[in-house]
Image (tube, coloured by chain):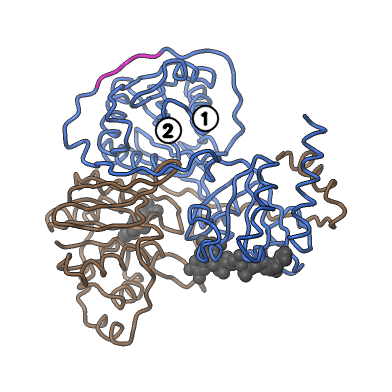
Amino acid sequence: MKILVCTSQVPDTTSKVAFSDNNTKFNTAGVTMIINPYDEWYALVRALELKESGIATAVHLITVGKADNEPVIRKALALGGDEAIRIDTDSNDPYVVAAEIANYAKNEGYGLVLCGKESIDYNNGIVGGMLAELLDMDYVGFAATLNVNGNIATIAREIEGGEEVVNVNIPLVVSCQKGMAEARIPNMRGIMAARTKPLKVVAASGVAALTTIEFYDMPPAKTGVKLFTADQLDELVSALHNEAKVI
Amino acid sequence: MSVLVFTEHTQGVFKKKCFEEVQYAAALAKQMNTTVTAVVLGNANADAMSQLGAYGAQKVLHVADARLDNLNSRAYTKAITAAAEKDSASVIILSHDVTGKAVGPRIAARMKAGMAAGAIALPDLSKGFVVKKAVFAGKAYAFVNITSEQKIVLLMQNSSPVIKGEGTAVVETFSVAFDDKDFGVQVKEVNKVTGVVPLGEAELVVSGGRGMKGPENWHILEDLANTMGAALACSRPVADSHWRPHHEHVGQTGGTIRPNLYVAVGISGAIQHLAGVNSSKTIVVINKDNEAPFFKAADYGVVGDALEIVPQLTAAMKKFKEAHH
Ligand SMILES: Cc1cc2nc3c(=O)[nH]c(=O)nc-3n(C[C@H](O)[C@H](O)[C@H](O)COP(=O)(O)OP(=O)(O)OC[C@H]3O[C@@H](n4cnc5c(N)ncnc54)[C@H](O)[C@@H]3O)c2cc1C
Ligand SMILES: Nc1ncnc2c1ncn2[C@@H]1O[C@H](COP(=O)(O)O)[C@@H](O)[C@H]1O
């Protein structure tokens, strides 16, 4: 069974968020890009574990993005994986991302397509579901464990108000979250090996976007904290009632 | 031309977020001069369904197939898409939750409808169909214009107060021809957290960090939460040390919540923690270190020892509750 892991690059969580061009573009100046944590810690590491235990035969990584994604793709390859595919286009429309991945993956015979539960920049959590539809596969989102036995995947997933364990036939698309695996740190051997692993660049099929981001805005700055002492807790409670109107 | 809204229920009961979705759909429908149809799947209660009218639904399409009691994204997609066709829906609203994110994207891909996830305000129709959403873990907002003919919106809960109105919806049963393949996900085991307000839905949340010192002290947070009617949450190290169950962990790697009130006790306010909570409307921080970073993100704060402050705050809350009974 071959596994495809969808990885995207995102600004490091600690980055300062700023916009340029009249608030229409995210300003990447001075921002460190990382592999989306859910893709790296959970989807990719679990895929590697499945390969190490002999269940998967190959792990491929796929990113929809321009050449500036390559350093991050190499970092992902340093953790493991046999090859990476980069689809050479840039879009923040989730449909474009999903359709480009689907167009590449549909004839490649992947048994599992893994993605993260959401990308930490746009916080959508929707590429995986779109991909499942476009590949005509089942979809299990918010998975916390994933095991494969023959043709059947057994997954613990989050549902409304709890968790459940499900069985699904492969092929399928799974979005991964905490519980799935323990984060790994690439070692020297991995880093060296990543330099020569294949990184295929594929031309985009030119799917048209269905959404555009018109502009960005910042939330109003907090006006500053109002402090209360231990003997003013009644005042705190009445501020929550009268001023904040939350109780 | 209607606005279709998917309202998920738990054993026949609709949660507040469904009412919020219906109300959102109704406000949108009003701007678009059209009506609201809710879609309900699986075994549901007729009375509860017609009650959706009190929040603005004119009609409910009910697909009463018992196999829909479990989440199968293919089956749900088929049912909701069929309802959308029957009703010539131009907009479909779902909740920005586990189910909405499993089903909405499938519907979007099937209909080639553009999608905005995590909407926190009504679309601005004067500029197209522009939806406001939080991005970069609440550090900014993006305004997403859906340019396709049909549109899908996943609504973030707690975006606007829910107000019950008058009226009942007409419930119509609606049948959909499913294939075996639509039920490919076989449920083996279910563990529902019962008896407590689910964290994602709670309007009030009390959360503890490492400053609580150990699980033996959590009863004071439980008392506070019970008094307020709040749900409990915690920081990641607290869940990692098994002081609290993992589903209570919020932050970048845990849940993202946006309650009306988040009370953070003994939590330093690391950026990864803030990522999960900084869209809360009001934040109260209790920390013994007046330089804890969380105070910068807070509206109200108390500097002091949590073990002393929390029981006193509980007492103050009790007093307030009794006075405002
Ligand atoms: C990639 C990554 C992802 C992460 N994801 C998450 C996440 O999802 N969620 C998360 O929470 N963290 C996450 N973290 C960890 C995060 O960086 C912090 O380490 C963590 O949030 C700290 O938890 P804490 O505030 O409970 O503990 P500490 O940082 O130890 O803070 C304890 C606080 O309690 C105060 N205190 C101590 N004693 C008392 C007392 N008696 N009374 C009152 N106050 C007291 C202290 O002043 C201090 O501010 C992540 C980290 C990384 C690197
Ligand atoms: N540009 C991209 N290239 C490859 N995979 C992506 C891309 N964007 C998102 N994904 C995958 O889809 C998941 C959900 O992303 P999103 O719907 O953007 O929150 C991510 O965790 C990735 O696994």
Residue at point 53% right, 13% down? B167
- Count all numbered tags in the image, as a single digit: 2
Compared across the picture, whether A19 is left or right of A212 comes to: right
Amino acid type of the residue tagged 1 in the rendering: Tyr
The chain identifier of the residue carrying mark 2 reads B
Secondary structure at badge 2 equals strand
Q: Position of residue A61 (x, y in %)?
A: 25, 66
Q: Name the disc covering residue B93, or none.
A: 2
Which chain has been coloured brown in this picture?
Answer: A
Q: Which residues are magenta?
A: B171-175
Compared across the picture, whether A240 is left or right of B219 comes to: right
Residue closest to the far front: B216
Amino acid type of the residue tagged 2 in the rendering: Ile
Contact check, label 2 and label 1, Cβ < 8 Å: yes
Check disc 2: other Cα within 10 Å, few if <14, some if 14-19, many if 20+. Answer: many
Image quadrant, ligand 2: bottom left
Q: Position of residue A128 (x, y in %)?
A: 31, 51
Q: Position of residue B147 (x, y in %)?
A: 38, 39
Is B15 inside the magenta-drawn segment? no
The correct choice, above or below, for A50 with respect to A161 in the image is: below
Which chain has been coloured blue in this picture?
Answer: B
Q: Name the disc covering residue B24, or none.
A: 1
The correct choice, above or below, for B110 with respect to B232 in the image is: above
Q: Earlier in the sequence, mark 2 or mark 1?
A: 1
The correct choice, above or below, for B211 with respect to B284 in the image is: below
Residue at point 77% right, 39% down? A241
In the image shown, does B143 or A42 lie closer to the viewer?
A42
**Disc 1 Cβ-to-ligand 2 distance below 8 Å:** no
Residue at point 76% right, 53% down? B300
